[in-house]
Amino acid sequence: MLRHLVTACGAKILGYVLLRHLGTTCGAKMLCYALLSHQVAARGTKVLCYAMLRHLVAAGGAEVFWYVLLRHLVTACGAKVLHFAMLRHLVTACGAKVLWYMPLRHLVTACGA
């Protein structure tokens, strides 16, 4: 069930009621499942918020895998800032060190963002 779909910087996004695949024209391909809540694309930076996200492949070639209830994913200046309800696994390909806790409230990368 698609709630909101917002694009900026001319990125075109194809959305459906039951979203299986999401592909943008800027060459970034995103695979998303379950309930899509919000997607915002602004000046090439993808900001994704899902109710339940299974897999996300970012545009920069960095692969980020996480499970269970994803609340917020924010990318700024190439740094990943992640907020989860329950974090299982997080893998970043940009080499940024990540600090987190079991009942995760905030997760901030070590690159200053």
Image (tube, rainbow, N blue to C red):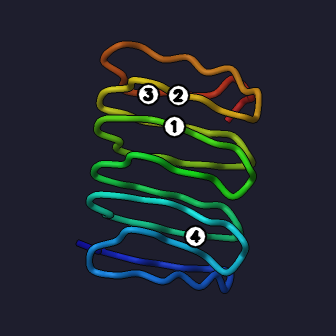
Disc 1 marks which residue? 65
Structural distance between the alpha carbons of marks 3 and 1? 17 Å
Badge 1 amino acid: Phe
Q: Quadrant of residue 91?
A: top right
Disc 2 marks which residue? 90
Q: Position of residue 58 (x, y in %)?
A: 63, 53
Estimate how packed mark 3 is, as few (under 14), some (14 to 19) or many (20 or more) residues with alpha carbons within 10 Å: some
Badge 3 amino acid: His
User: What mark, if any, has residue 94 been given in the picture?
Assistant: none
Q: Residue at x 52, y 50 (%)?
A: 56
Estimate how packed mark 4 is, as few (under 14), some (14 to 19) or many (20 or more) residues with alpha carbons within 10 Å: some
Structural distance between the alpha carbons of marks 1 and 4? 20 Å
Q: Residue at x 29, y 39 (%)?
A: 69
Earlier-in-chain disc, 3 versus 1: 1
User: Looking at the image, is 110 positioned above or below residue 63?
Assistant: above
User: What mark, if any, has residue 106 been given in the picture?
Assistant: 3
Badge 2 amino acid: Leu
Badge 4 amino acid: Ala
Q: Nearer the viewer, residue 9 or 113?
A: 9
Structural distance between the alpha carbons of marks 2 and 1? 6 Å
User: What mark, if any, has residue 41 been given in the picture?
Assistant: 4
**Image quarter of the C terminus:** top right
Q: Residue at x 56, y 74 (%)?
A: 23
- Dot 3 falls on a residue whose secondary structure is loop
Disc 2, disc 1: CB below 8 Å?
A: yes
Using residue 110 as the reference point, say whether residue 22 is left or right of it. left
User: Looking at the image, is 70 positioned above or below residue 105?
Assistant: below
Structural distance between the alpha carbons of marks 3 and 2? 13 Å
Structural distance between the alpha carbons of marks 4 and 3? 22 Å
Earlier-in-chain disc, 3 versus 2: 2
- Dot 2 falls on a residue whose secondary structure is loop
